Image: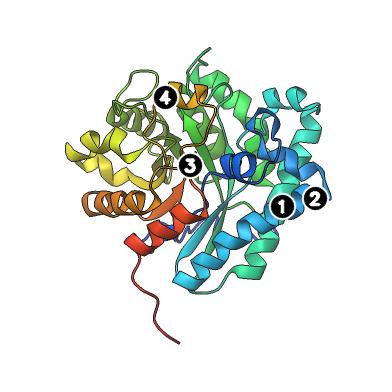
Amino acid sequence: MTHRHARYRHQLPLLSETVFIMDGGMETTFIFHEGVELPYFASIDLMRTDEGRERLRSYYTRFLSLARDRGAGFVIDGPNWRASPDWAPKLGLSTDEMMELNRASIDLMADLRERFGTPSTPIVIAGVVGPRGDGYQPGAMMSVEEAARYHARQIETFADTAADMVSAYTLNYVEEAIGVALAAQAVDMPSTISFTLETDGRLPSGQSLREAIEQVDAATGAAPAYFMINCAHPTHFQNVVAEGGAWLDRIRGLRANASMRSHAELDSAPDLDAGNPVELGRQYRDLRSRMRNLNILGGCCGTDFRHVEQICLACLPEPQAA
């Protein structure tokens, strides 16, 4: 294994008080703002053409420039959310071809890190894992062992690249989360687990967020470097945060939706609900006042550059004049 640019694999700088930002809702930005067709919401499809790869570079560049201007770190998530084996045939690919796209996408991320990384803007590269099935509904639930076997191929691919860590997003039941964490642990990759929540602050499986985090930690020896929440609006889980508890310290990251709509409403909506970027920034600031380790901030469905910019304005100090 070469790990050509893997500078942070065993000492992640985001496990600190430094604020790291992320991009916004990549797929909704491409589809609704740029008119790009993404089959099955799969951004990895863009890696198949020169035009698509250039579109990805341009997309990330704007957020990386913002991080550098604000003196923040950046977590650059690869476009791999729907790049696991079951999605390959839906995109007309073999599993091997899909894994090559995963590998190439991390190479692209590494090139961007070489271009934008500075001592004041450390850049962590994450190979992204998504749910085997639908992001909003548990559907056919795997056992822990099945989940670890399924996700191992993609995670093993990331382990042989410049990716510093594995980030699993929009997981909606705990067994899949445990399987991902164990598969990453097996190849000595740090991981983060991000659950999606319904409007009542619970996982789509019905389990509470606290129970899910504690179960993953108990089953894996606290293998994940940290936990996140994504694809939910702050109003959906503010009641959970208000309850407090030491377990909240395990949550470092948030990629919230722009919209207050439920998953069912988002699924059936013909339009994009971009919400209120300024209000979202304030909601992030409020959550940070109650979640002392919340330092990794980005967006999910419906968010774009405007939202991440407002999150920066609300949560980061003004940059010092040169």
In whole angstroms, how far apart are the C-alphas of marks 4 and 1?
Answer: 34 Å
Q: Which amino acid, mark 3?
A: Cys
Horizontal and vertical percent position of residue 313: 37, 64
Q: Are marks 3 and 1 in contact (CB under 8 Å)?
A: no
| Nearer-N-terminus badge (3/4) | 4
Q: Are marks 2 and 1 in contact (CB under 8 Å)?
A: yes
In whole angstroms, how far apart are the C-alphas of marks 2 and 3?
Answer: 24 Å
As drawn, the label of residue 55 is: 1
Q: Is residue 101 above or below residue 76?
A: above
Horizontal and vertical percent position of residue 167: 52, 42
| Nearer-N-terminus badge (4/1) | 1
Relative to 213, is 165 on the left or the right? right
Q: Which residue is mark 4?
A: 174
Q: Image point 70% across, 62% down: which residue?
A: 111
Q: Which residue is mark 2?
A: 51
As drawn, the label of residue 300 is: 3
Q: Are marks 2 and 3 in contact (CB under 8 Å)?
A: no
Horizontal and vertical percent position of residue 53: 75, 51
Q: Name the mark nearer the viewer: 4 or 1.
A: 1
In whole angstroms, how far apart are the C-alphas of marks 2 and 1?
Answer: 6 Å
Q: Which scheme is used to colour this image of the protein? A: rainbow
Q: Is residue 62 above or below residue 197?
A: below
Q: Image point 52% across, 16% down: which residue?
A: 142
Q: Name the mark nearer the viewer: 3 or 4.
A: 3
| Nearer-N-terminus badge (2/3) | 2
Q: Residue furthest bottom?
A: 322
